[in-house]
Image: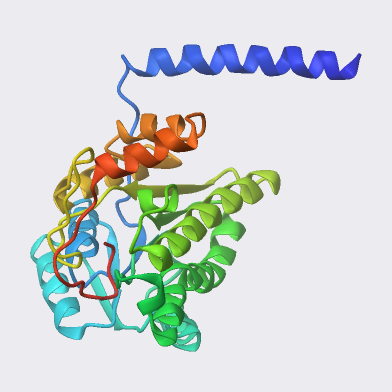
Amino acid sequence: MNIILDYLLLFAIAVYSYLEAIVKCFIPLKRKSVSGDIVLITGSGHGMGRITACEFAKRQSIVVLWDINKQGLDETAEDCRRLGATVHVYVVDCSKRLEIYSAAEKVKKEVGDVDILVNNAGVVFGTEFMQLQDHQIEKIFDVNILAHFWTTKCFLPAMMKKNRGHIVTVASVAGHVGICYLVDYCATKFGAVGFHTALTEELHALGYHGIKTTCLCPVFVNTGFVQNPSTRLWPVLNPEYVVKCLMDGILTNKKMLIVPSSVKHSLVLQQFLPERVINTLNKMQDVQFGTQFRSATKKD
């Protein structure tokens, strides 16, 4: 009898949720203020990380910049200061756990408790699986997924004490589908999506409803780290558009952001379509890149 009541409750919740979603289509979502919040962004010396830092600077956040590239950090810091923000700069190699821990302690002492953590740093190599060097595989896992664990372990305890904060995971559509020549990258982005999903569930189960999480999963972003990406079915996005979607998601506490949203339908269909159809779609997609990839501690 109890299981029947549980299913009836589940049905009622589903109906309510769909009705709520329909209503929200016509009512603008309330955006939270991040003024005065301490926002730490990894991989902020270039591309999406820099644009994200500037967006928080516009909103009067205290911006903490991490990157391995000092020149890029200084340029981002100058952009943020011109927008009137207080900026703190730290040269950090996110592939090194102890360096992350050391920099985190400095941030806590010199700036304070981080309110919003944006795990944006990433590496991409883009080559056939058997051409990958061992050190490349270790590097991409260190930066693209393990660094998320180390940074979150550093800054989550303070959020838990206050039951307030926000953890942002910059992943990729490559965290939902496999793409040839990106075996290592896809593996780490699948890990990042799983990290976000499981952490979100755990925080909810433990009663930390004031700590929000957001995961960004765009298709290819034209930041220069992937050389001349092209696809027949998916667009190649400009970083300004992707960051706009990310900021909207953070400010409205959205958990999962697929960019563009139309890609959601492709992801759902792949769960039901026959393998032969999926293989044909992959051929139609015709994902191609330039002659070489560059790697850097940055997203895409």
Is residue 101 among the parts visible in the rendering?
yes
Name the spot of residue 14 as percent of width and height, x first.
59, 17
Compare residues 89 and 280 and report the one nearer the observer.
280
On the picture, is 198 further left or further right than 212?
Answer: right
Seen in the picture, residue 25 relative to 202 is either above or below; the reply is above
Name the spot of residue 54 as percent of width and height, x first.
17, 59
Q: Quadrant of the C terminus?
A: bottom left
Which residue occupies 42% across, 87% down? 135
Seen in the picture, residue 51 relative to 231 is either above or below; the reply is below
On the picture, is 77 further left or further right than 63?
Answer: left
Compare residues 105 and 199 and report the one nearer the observer.
199
Q: Quadrant of the N terminus?
A: top right
Is residue 109 among the parts visible in the rendering?
no
The chosen color scheme is: rainbow
Which residue occupies 30% across, 31% down? 262
Picture quarter containing residue 204? top right
Name the spot of residue 193 as percent of width and height, x first.
48, 53
Compare residues 31 and 23 and report the one nearer the observer.
23
Q: How many marks?
A: 0
On the picture, is 219 further left or further right than 277?
Answer: left
Compare residues 250 and 220 and report the one nearer the observer.
220
Name the spot of residue 113 as percent of width and height, x first.
46, 68
On the picture, is 84 further left or further right than 62?
Answer: left
Seen in the picture, residue 114 relative to 256 is either above or below; the reply is below
Picture quarter containing residue 77? bottom left
Q: Which residue in the rendered view is the most extreme toward the right?
A: 1
Which residue occupies 53% across, 18% down? 17
